[in-house]
Image (cartoon, helix red, strand yellow):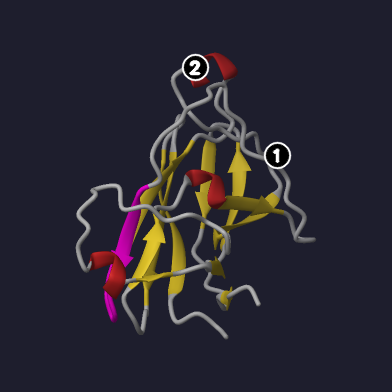
Amino acid sequence: MDTAFNITLEHVAATSQCHTFRLAFDGSEERLLLPYPEVTGLQFSNGDNHVVAEWMTTMLISSPLDDFVLNPDGRIAFDLSARINVEPESNLKRRWSIQLPVGEALHVCYIFEVAPDRDWYDFLAKRSRFVAITKQWRGMVQSSTVPLTISEGTLSSTLAKEPNDAREPG
């Protein structure tokens, strides 16, 4: 069964150190509990749909898994800061970075995936009806696609919407 929400990706800002992508969730037909998106869900691919690079980190960090609620007919957006082609020494205080080819036309999308066996935990220990009335969603949704080309020291992109590919594991 297809999921009843969409995610849309936009490139909203670029500096020499950081590129900001806005990820918006909307179109839900029911109240859903979802994990917060991570920058590592951004995928950069070439014209052959081959992923051109993987995210790198210089730190091992443990942190709680936070969740948010997507209400019916609601919309919520998150800004993801991507460190693209940043010099390694400037990455020392940055959790994630990625090295992308310069001059190649790329496509960026966001893959939002929640494993079927993901454990959910009430971090606030409210023991309220919150968990009982909110569906804990699991599955995979792919965002719209943003084409971009990396230039020396800059990033250019234009928004292009492609159909969302949303499905839940069988």
Going by the numbered disc 2, the residue's amino acid type is: Leu
Please say if the residues under marks 2 and 1 sit with CB atoms less than 8 Å apart.
no
Q: Find numbered disc 1 in the image and state the secondary structure of the residue it sits on.
A: loop
- Asked if 72 appears above or below 75 in the picture, the reply is below
Going by the numbered disc 1, the residue's amino acid type is: Pro
The nearer-to-camera label among 2 and 1 is 2
Please give left or right for residue 71 compared with residue 167 in the image.
left
Q: Which mark is residue 101?
A: 1
Q: Residue at x 58, y 64 (%)?
A: 116
Where is residue 6 shown, x and y percent of the image?
45, 74
Please give left or right for residue 162 compared with residue 170 in the image.
left
Where is residue 91 shown, x and y percent of the image?
51, 21
Residue 8, located in which quarter of the rendered image? bottom left
Q: Nearer the viewer, residue 139 or 123?
A: 123
Q: Residue at x 60, y 35 (%)?
A: 98
Residue 70 magenta: yes
Please give left or right for residue 131 compared with residue 2 in the image.
left
Q: Which residues are magenta?
A: 66-76
Q: Residue at x 51, y 67 (%)?
A: 138
Q: Quadrant of the C terminus?
A: bottom right
Q: Residues within 10 Å of mark 1 (few under 14, many from 20)?
A: some
Where is residue 156 shown, x and y percent of the image?
52, 49
Where is residue 53 shown, x and y percent of the image?
70, 41
Find disc 2 in the rendering and name its residue: 92
